[in-house]
Image (cartoon, helix red, strand yellow):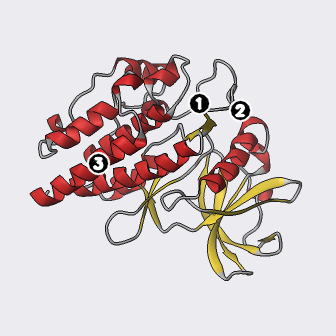
Amino acid sequence: MGEAELPDVGTRLSGRYRLDGVLARGGVGVIYQGFDVDTSREIAVKVLPRSIDRGTKRERFLREAKVAAKVGHPHVVKVYDFGFYGDSRPFLVMELLHGASLHRRIQSVGPLSIPDACSMGSQILSACEAVHEAGLVHRDIKPGNVFLMKALGITAKLIDFGMSKSVVEDPDPITEPGRILGTPSYMAPELLVGRDADARTDLYGVGATLFEGLLGRPIVKPHKRVEQTFADVLRRENIKPSTLRPKIPPYVDEIICRALEREPDDRFETATEMKRACDQALNEAVKAGL
């Protein structure tokens, strides 16, 4: 995407949000580090460039603004404001997060300790409780959408609600019939065969995130041909993580394997149930000195 279509560094959106530099570029938007001159607060500002300000990408961007603001939870990225700039292109004002996604953390530091993984899982499941209570499913929980804050211990935030879906609205106004949305390696099998997402779909994503957080590799390796990745997801055997990292205790194996069951009915029923298991696992892991 060309720089000319993006706001210049130093621009003020809505007269108050100063853009101080580009932090990241993604599939749906560019994130700036910014400053709210009215509140003297550092912020992050996500903008939608002209080249992708259309169709489903615009709708997902608008959805992210509405959903994250609606949920409002300590482990969900905060949304402060929403508006339009230039020729009616949208922008989103969020809390500025210091740290890195779990994906980047694994790349730079390696897998998490067992207690840190259990703590992260509990926090993300707490966020899922709030999301599900709001009648929504995230649909894209993965290491890239779990942000680990720079803090003592593990503090996790669930980000990017562009793929989220209301479980009480049918049909999904953004998802075209027959079209599969999400990140193939982390998608629950039911999504690949055209079944509806529900809370247990997100629990599969948490299981996949825990697996990668502990082992440093995804449960399914992505292929250049997405059809091959889909096939691998559908025929994947549910292996115990301890076969790849022997120090992982049986109670952690059980949580991850149950979350990653092929059939939703075989998984945890709710985020609350899975969070309780992660909390118990954290206590056991700490007692064992893992």
Of badges 2 and 1, the one in the foreground is 2
Residue at mark 2 = 174
Q: Earlier in the sequence, mark 2 or mark 1?
A: 2
Is residue 278 left or right of 242 when viewed as pictured? right
- Residue located at (17% from left, 54% from top): 285
Which residue type carries mark 2? Ile
- Residue located at (23% from left, 54% from top): 282
Which residue type carries mark 1? Leu
Q: How many marks?
A: 3
- Residue located at (54% from left, 41% from top): 138
Is residue 76 left or right of 94 when viewed as pictured? left
Q: Is residue 166 above or below residue 124?
A: above
- Residue located at (52% from left, 50% from top): 130
| Cα separation between marks 2 and 1 | 10 Å
Is residue 60 left or right of 164 when viewed as pictured? right
Is residue 141 left or right of 135 when viewed as pictured? left
| Cα separation between marks 1 and 3 | 28 Å
| Cα separation between marks 3 and 2 | 33 Å
The one of 180 and 4 positioned closer to us in this rendering:
180
